[in-house]
Image (tube, grey):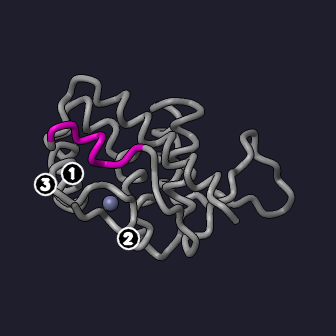
Amino acid sequence: MTHCPECGAPAEPRSCEELFQVLLALDHSRQPPWGPLHGVSVSCFLLQHPARIPGADAAPPWSLLHAYLRDGLDGANRRIRHARRGNSHRHPGGFVPAVPEVAAPDVDRPPARFAVTIADVAGGGDFPAEGFAGRVRDWAAATVDAWTSRPG
Ligand SMILES: [Zn+2]
């Protein structure tokens, strides 16, 4: 059996890319539980496949996952709205934000594996609604965990 070189998930019967396309189609239906978790799902997928991160800047998905794990979906959505307003999340001039920013990891040194991958979230391959939110939460936690604890 072959595995994804980035996240370590089994590449069969469906590759990460194929699963991601299934997940995006569900997200774009805007139906719960998938639609509301779209930003979290994409952030998990990007951080487990860092070659795809736009501009190799891990800060947006990294900040979103931290907000989600700390404050739940509301926190993540506030983060998305904040980003969409185009505000910089850097704070020049010594202004200290109420919630400290968490430094984004260096995408050149990704973790070798993750305890939870998109294959786990997919269940049989179609991302069943039952338990989906919990699996995404595990996915997010495993993603942050692996990046945080990888050997220096
Ligand atoms: Zn993968």
93 on left or right of 97:
right
Question: Is 57 on the left-hand or right-hand side of 152?
Answer: left
- Disc nearer the start of the sequence (3/1): 3
Magenta part of the chain: 116-124
Tell me the quarter of the picture where residue 151 sits.
bottom right
| Ligand 1 location (quadrant) | bottom left
| Residue linked to disc 2 | 52
Q: Quadrant of the C terminus?
A: bottom right
111 and 62: which is toward the camera: 111
| Alpha-carbon span between mark 3 and mark 1 | 18 Å
What is the x, y in percent for residue 92?
Answer: 78, 63
Q: Characterize the local packing of mark 1: few (<14), some (14-19) or many (20 or more) Cα atoms within 10 angstroms.
A: some
Question: Label 1 belongs to which residue?
Answer: 24
Percent x, y for residue 123?
Answer: 21, 37
Residue closest to the eye, 76 or 112: 112
Relative to 32, residue 24 above or below: below
Q: Which mark is residue 13?
A: 3
Q: Residue at x 55, y 70 (%)?
A: 107
Which is more foreground, mark 3 or mark 2?
Answer: 3
Q: Is mark 1 within 8 Å of ligand 1?
A: no
Residue at 35% x, 46% y is 41
Work out whether residue 72 or residue 93 is closer to the camera in this orientation and state it.
72
Residue toward you, 73 or 9: 9
Label 2: element kind: helix
The quarter of the image holding the N terminus is bottom left
Q: Looking at the picture, which amino acid does disc 2 mark?
A: Arg
